[in-house]
Image (spheres, helix red, strand yellow):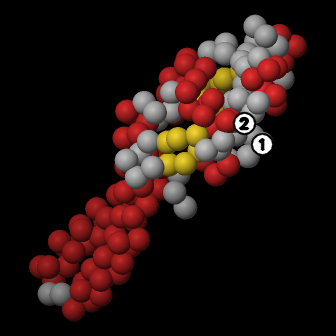
Amino acid sequence: MGGQESFEVEHFRPRNKFPQLDCVYSNLYYACRKCNAHKSDTWPSDELMARGMQFADPCVGDPYVQDLKEEADGSVKGITPSGAYTTAHIRLHREDVNRWRRLRAQARKDIPVFTVLIGSLEQLRLVALDPGRGEIDAQIEALNRYIADARNRFVID
């Protein structure tokens, strides 16, 4: 989604409503520039918060486990009032975010397949004639680069 340059410090509780938290470390979150812009100075009223309509706090729990459900098409839906509120205000349904989720899901499927393929290619390299080994090595290197890039890009272990 644009790499590290696309992230910035976000004041979870907005500065204009909570000036005392302006430089409090526990209120400073790492956020995507677009999500931060959509959230901006928005903060729910006490009445909304009493009904659970508030921003999911990623420092309290994983919103993608507790508050949101990822769909196969990359979209998300709120499964709690907090998830619905967060999705609507941060616009987690944006197409660029949906596309990123689809790519991450595909990478999660591809990595195990490619890992097995690397093992097969390594076995083939053991019996290949010298001219064929270079091509096999290049294929193994390409697969390893894809796996490393996907793990890094999508934070996959």
Q: What residue type is labelled 2?
A: Asp
**Up/down of 83 relative to 33, above or below:** below
Q: Is residue 100 left or right of residue 11?
A: left
Q: Position of residue 140 (x, y in %)?
A: 29, 70
In which quarter of the view is residue 124 placed? bottom left
For label 1, count other residues whose C-alpha is less than 10 Å away and answer few (under 14), some (14-19) or many (20+).
few
For label 2, count other residues whose C-alpha is less than 10 Å away and answer few (under 14), some (14-19) or many (20+).
some
Q: Where is residue 151 in the image (x, y as percent from the top left)?
A: 47, 56
Is the residue under label 2 in contact with that under label 1 (CB below 8 Å)?
Answer: yes
Can I make out residue 149 in this image?
no
Q: Is residue 80 left or right of residue 97?
A: right
Residue pushed farthest left?
131
Q: What residue type is labelled 1?
A: Val
Q: Name the residue under label 1.
A: 60
Residue pushed farthest right?
20
Q: In this view, does 99 lie to the left or right of 155?
A: left
The residue drawn where x is 77% and y is 42% is 60
Q: Which of 126 and 66 is in front in this view?
A: 66
Q: In which quarter of the image is the C terminus?
A: bottom right
Q: Nearer the viewer, residue 26 or 90?
A: 90
Residue pushed farthest bottom?
127
Q: Nearer the viewer, residue 44 or 11?
A: 44
The residue drawn where x is 20% and y is 79% is 133
Q: Mark 2 points at which residue?
A: 57
The secondary element bearing badge 1 is classed as loop
Q: Is residue 144 left or right of residue 20?
A: left
